[in-house]
Image (tube, rainbow, N blue to C red):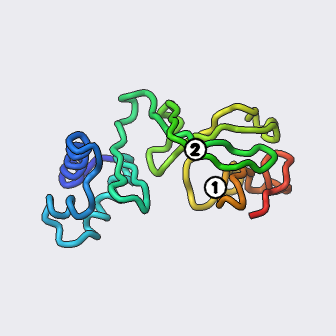
Amino acid sequence: MPLTRRQREILDFISAQISAQGYAPSFEEIAERFTFRSLATVHEHLTNLERKGYIRRAHNESRGIEVVPPRGQTGATDLPLHGLVAAGAPIEAVSGTDTIAVPDELIPRRGRSYVLKVRGQSMIDEHIKDGDFIVVHERNQADNGRRWSRWCTARAPRSSGSIGNPAGGSGSSPPTPP
């Protein structure tokens, strides 16, 4: 989707700030630069830039704006490796600083994505084997017929499953209780 003149100016400002400072500008800095009277106006512009796939935002994180390179420019994007996903039995969720290059065509332009390494054999019927890496697109709910993975607290580790599966879990595994 094409950008409006103002959206292009804001995107250019964000890119310049990240290049110069090493981090994104705050909402207040964007509002000051463009003389917006309200932070809601900044939020609206950033939401539109994210919806159009030009930026990613880390919600609840100060200065959590990342400019997304245009599709086809790099061929691959480094996504964070957020640890392991259980394929059959619960395991502890581990987060690190490692990244994995993922082809751009596997990553939706909107929203946050990350990579998990599969541990276990219960998703073998879906051609997902122990040691495979899966790309996860962060969402608030799973669609019927789609695979899912959930990130929980330390008491209930990450698990995966399939909506519409009578067993409720991934492959032949029962669901992991919350």
Q: Nearer the viewer, residue 142 or 81?
A: 81
- Among the 4 quarters of the image, the one containing residue 136: top right
Residue 151's mark?
1
Instruction: Estimate how packed mark 2 is, as few (under 14), some (14 to 19) or many (20 or more) residues with alpha carbons within 10 Å.
Output: some
Horizontally, is 15 left or right of 146 in the view? left
x then y, percent, for residue 76: 45, 30
Mark 2 touching mark 1, by CB under 8 A? yes
Q: Could you say whether the residue bearing mark 2 is in a helix, strand or loop?
A: strand
x then y, percent, for residue 178: 74, 64
Task: Specify the amino acid type for callout 1.
Answer: Trp
Horizontally, is 114 left or right of 34 in the view? right
Compare marks 2 and 1 and give the one earlier in the sequence: 2
The residues bearing labels 2 and 1 have C-alpha atoms spaced at a distance of: 10 Å
Horizontally, is 21 left or right of 158 in the view? left
Write down the residue under mark 2. 82
Instruction: Estimate how packed mark 1 is, as few (under 14), some (14 to 19) or many (20 or more) residues with alpha carbons within 10 Å.
Output: few
Which residue is at a point 62% across and 42% down the rendered structure image? Answer: 83
